[in-house]
Amino acid sequence: MKVTSEIFRAYDIRGIADKDFNKEFAYHLGKAYALSLVPGQKVSVGYDCRLTSLKYAKALEKGLLESGLHVINIGMCPTPLLYFSIFNDNLDGGIMITGSHNPSEYNGFKICLGKKSLHGEEIQELKKVIEKEKYRDAKGSVTKREKPIVDSYIEHLHKRFPLLLQNKDLNRNIKVVIDSGNGTAALVAPKLIKSFGFKTCELFSEVDGTFPNHHPDPSIEENLISLIHWVLEEQADVGIAYDGDADRIGVVNEGGEIIWGDTLLTLFAQEIFKQKKSVTVIGEVKCSNSLYEVIKNMGGKAIMWKTGHSFIKDKLREENADIAGEMSGHIFFKDRYFGYDDALYASCRLLEILIHSNKKLSDHTKDYPKYYSTPEIRVPSDDHQKFKIVASLKKHFSKDYPIISIDGIRIQFGDGWGLIRPSNTQPILVMRFEAKTPERLIELQNKVEAALKTL
């Protein structure tokens, strides 16, 4: 089968639905994936609320069944619940059909073999198998879980957070605004948070794959405008937003201030330090120096790593770390959890902090080292050219400054840094800048952008 090479990305398969791939591709993907397993092994299939997801799930399932696998169809759900099905039910793998945080015209496939998310060469190997079309023919079977995955998941989190469950009366003093963004978080988040007794104000809880109210990516400030408004309007203690498949969390404090992913990671790590003498934390190249400084000052180990959920999960296992996170709002808890990115679980950890401390969320973060930074700056770039551009900028700046090249380039200016990296999920360059003063921040940004314009 002829395929579009660009859809095979660093840690998943993703592209424009019914343009870059179609139902036939999903069927072939199922056949190709099945070759990594033996007939009779069990895999789960879930899908998000995008308009093309159900038909891709059916086609994928057909390919898996015709290759001898036992398929457990868990239906429409957030991505973390697909991961949960693999860990909790001890399955041999699973595939989630989701466009994640991408615009509504996108879709894709997040693929797990065993409890590991495929990435890099493993994704490219699937491409080679599909192109050859040398598959296995065998008769498989399909079942649905006896209990809906959402019910099993919520019951599991009740066991993970017994004190939250026991303190329902106390929890009613906390008001939470929940922005599900019309994504699959709406199937779980309101029910989960209410089950612990918290007062809630719901935004956009109607599942709608066109995402009519705002784009479901909480790492972009404009997508949090409604959440900020209603946190202030309701005088709420916290606002929580999710991306389209609920593996990214966005948080707003009681004053309407956005708590970005690296700050949130710092807060969670501090709480883990209260229970452990030594804590290992993994951040990524977009994270603030503040994160790394706080962890170091507490006597912990802070590791900077590549952006991307599959890369981070691998590093988490390799380092036996307690927690990891990304600026985008992916938070990975190994401490008291399975080690995958789950924004719903992260919500419970955040609410646990608030209910046990009797402090406002802003009080928890006010003493972190102060830096000035830009949000993610996304520059459109051809999927082929973006890598060449980063290579050229590395050559240019490495003459005068140290470069961290774990993922793209992070130029170390001494009193700040500038990051340029090619996105692994979209045809864009991602940039971010940080400095100790607003004036220096502008200087660093201008310096890098001027070099970019010459290419």
Image: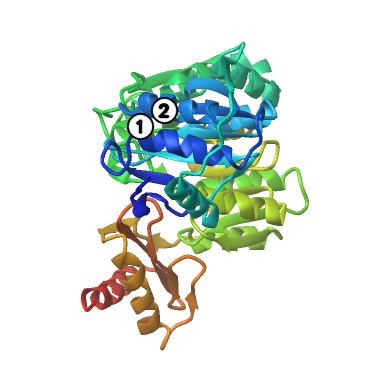
Q: Alpha-carbon distance for marks 2 and 1?
A: 6 Å
Three-letter code, disc 1: Lys
Q: Position of residue 123 (x, y in %)?
A: 50, 51
* Residue nearest the viewer, comparing 178 with 419: 419
The outermost residue toward the right is 277
Residue 111, labelled with which disc?
none
**Numbered disc 2: secondary structure:** helix
Total marks shown come to 2
Image quadrant containing the C terminus = bottom left
Confirm or deny contact between disc 2 and disc 1 (CB under 8 A).
Answer: yes
Question: Where is residue 258, by image quadrant?
Answer: top left
- Mark 2: few/some/many CA within 10 Å (<14, 14-19, 20+): many
Q: Residue at x 60, y 22 (%)?
A: 153
> In this rendering, does residue 341 appear at all?
no
At x 29% / y 39%, what residue is drawn? Answer: 103
Q: Residue at x 52, y 68 (%)?
A: 406
Residue behind mark 2? 59
Which of 304 and 1 lies nearest the eye of the viewer? Answer: 1
Residue 327 vertical position relative to residue 76 in the rendered view, above or below: below
- Residue under circle 1? 23
Is residue 220 visible from the viewing direction of this image? yes
Question: What is the x, y in percent for residue 231?
Answer: 37, 30
- For the residue carrying disc 1, how many other residues have a C-alpha within 10 Å: few (<14), some (14-19), or many (20+)? some
Q: Mark 2 is on which residue type?
A: Ala
Q: Position of residue 143 (x, y in %)?
A: 58, 16
Which residue reaches farthest bottom? 399
**Relative vertical location of residue 136 with respect to residue 212 in this rendering, above or below:** below
